[in-house]
Image (cartoon, rainbow, N blue to C red):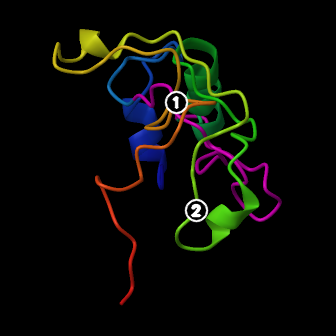
């Protein structure tokens, strides 16, 4: 969130999340200059409904947002890695409640922990020549 007006849309006058701005079952990892700055307050005036840090804390508490290392292999810093996570990416959110065409699973992301990646032939090719 880049400004106080955006953060204020996320909360009611009591500082509770409204549901107008939500991050569900997402991983924020290695963010900011120190690697642990997931949110910073943009408005410290008395008229602010809530702060960005309050919104982020609510997402962590109520919507399955995690700040833990998902355990992606170091090779993922370069193109062509196998992005299957080895860290904690568990989730209790049922994706089919958004749309029945979505599969429900117990993890965040596109890759099941401990399972083969779908980023293999014949589905996709990273050939450069």
Quarter of the rendering occupied by the C terminus: bottom left
SS under mark 1: loop
Relative to 5, does residue 103 appear above or below in the rendering?
above
Spot occupied by residue 6 in the image (x, y as percentages of width and height):
40, 43
Query: Residue pushed farthest bottom?
Result: 129
SS under mark 2: loop
Query: Residue pushed farthest right?
Result: 34
Using the numbered discs, state the Cα–Cα distance from disc 2 to disc 1 in whole angstroms. Answer: 15 Å
Relative to 65, does residue 2 appear above or below in the rendering?
below
Q: Residue at x 52, y 68 (%)?
A: 80
Label 1: few (<14), some or many (≥20) within 10 Å? some
Please tell me the numbered disc located at residue 25.
none
Mark 2 or mark 1: name the one nearer the start of the chain: 2
- 38 is within the stretch colored magenta: yes
> Taking 42 as reference, is 30 left or right?
right
Spot occupied by residue 83 in the image (x, y as percentages of width and height):
57, 50
Which of 6/126 is in front?
Answer: 126
Which of 6/72 is in front?
Answer: 72
Range shown magenta: 22-47
Q: Residue at x 63, y 28 (%)?
A: 89
> Taking 34 as reference, is 75 left or right?
left
- 97 is within the stretch colored magenta: no
Q: Which residue in the structure is indicated by mark 2?
A: 81
Q: Which residue in the structure is indicated by mark 1?
A: 112
Which of 36/100 is in front?
Answer: 100
Magenta: predominant secondary structure element? Answer: loop
Q: Residue at x 51, y 12 (%)?
A: 14
Query: Residue pushed farthest front?
Result: 122
> Taking 20 as reference, is 48 left or right?
right
């Amino acid at each position: 969130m880049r400004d106080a007006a955006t953060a204020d849309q996320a909360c009611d006058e009591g500082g509770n999340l409204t549901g107008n701005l939500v991050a569900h079952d997402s991983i924020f990892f290695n963010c900011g200059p120190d690697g642990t700055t997931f949110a910073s307050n943009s408005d410290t005036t008395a008229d602010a409904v809530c702060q960005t840090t309050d919104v982020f804390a609510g997402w962590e508490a109520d919507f399955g947002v995690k700040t833990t290392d998902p355990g992606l292999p170091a090779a993922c810093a370069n193109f062509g890695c196998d992005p299957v996570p080895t860290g904690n990416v568990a989730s209790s959110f049922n994706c089919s409640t958004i749309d029945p065409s979505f599969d429900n699973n117990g993890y965040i992301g596109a890759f099941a922990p401990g399972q083969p990646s779908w980023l293999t032939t014949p589905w996709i090719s990273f050939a450069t020549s």
